[in-house]
Image (cartoon, grey):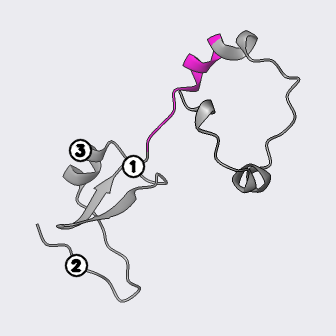
Amino acid sequence: MLIKIDPAGQVTLPTSVLDALGVGPGDRIEIVEGPDGFILRPPRKIDYSSLGTLKDKIRGDYEPLDIHVFREQPYDPSLRD
């Protein structure tokens, strides 16, 4: 399948491709570079309705995690698994 690039650097994907990806106007498509070229795929969607059951299981009394401080901590193999 050949797709023409317009002067603005944009392409129009055929409806069959959009339908196969399950995307439409306004949606985003992820482009991933692989060893054999590029792969187009829809971004992973999270079904937030399934997270509602976790609401009462997560305590809210934790301090926010500072990733920079966390990365500076030495590796402790006893914490693995």
Callout 1 crowding tier (Cα within 10 Å): few <14, some 14–19, many ≥20: few
Residue under label 1? 24
Question: Is label 1 in contact with label 2 (beta carbons under 8 Å)?
Answer: no
Asked whether 28 or 55 is in front, the reply is 55
* In the displayed structure image, the side of residue 38 where residue 45 appears, left or right: right
Magenta segment: 44-53
Residue at screen point 74% across, 10% down? 56
In the displayed structure, 34 sits above or below 74; it is below
**The residue tagged with tag 2: helix, strand or loop?**
loop
Residue at screen point 37% across, 48% down? 42
In the displayed structure, 11 sits above or below 28; it is below
Asked whether 69 or 43 is in front, the reply is 69
Callout 2 crowding tier (Cα within 10 Å): few <14, some 14–19, many ≥20: few
What amino acid is at disc 3?
Ala
Q: Main secondary structure of the magenta part?
A: helix
The Cα–Cα distance between marks 1 and 2, rounded to whole angstroms, is 19 Å
Residue under label 2? 4
The Cα–Cα distance between marks 1 and 3, rounded to whole angstroms, is 10 Å
Outermost residue on the left side: it is 1
Question: Which mark sits nearer the N-terminus, 2 or 3?
Answer: 2
Tell me where residue 9 sits by quadrant: bottom left
Callout 3 crowding tier (Cα within 10 Å): few <14, some 14–19, many ≥20: few
The Cα–Cα distance between marks 2 and 3, rounded to whole angstroms, is 20 Å
**The residue tagged with tag 3: helix, strand or loop?**
helix
Residue under label 3? 20
Question: Is label 2 in contact with label 3 (beta carbons under 8 Å)?
Answer: no
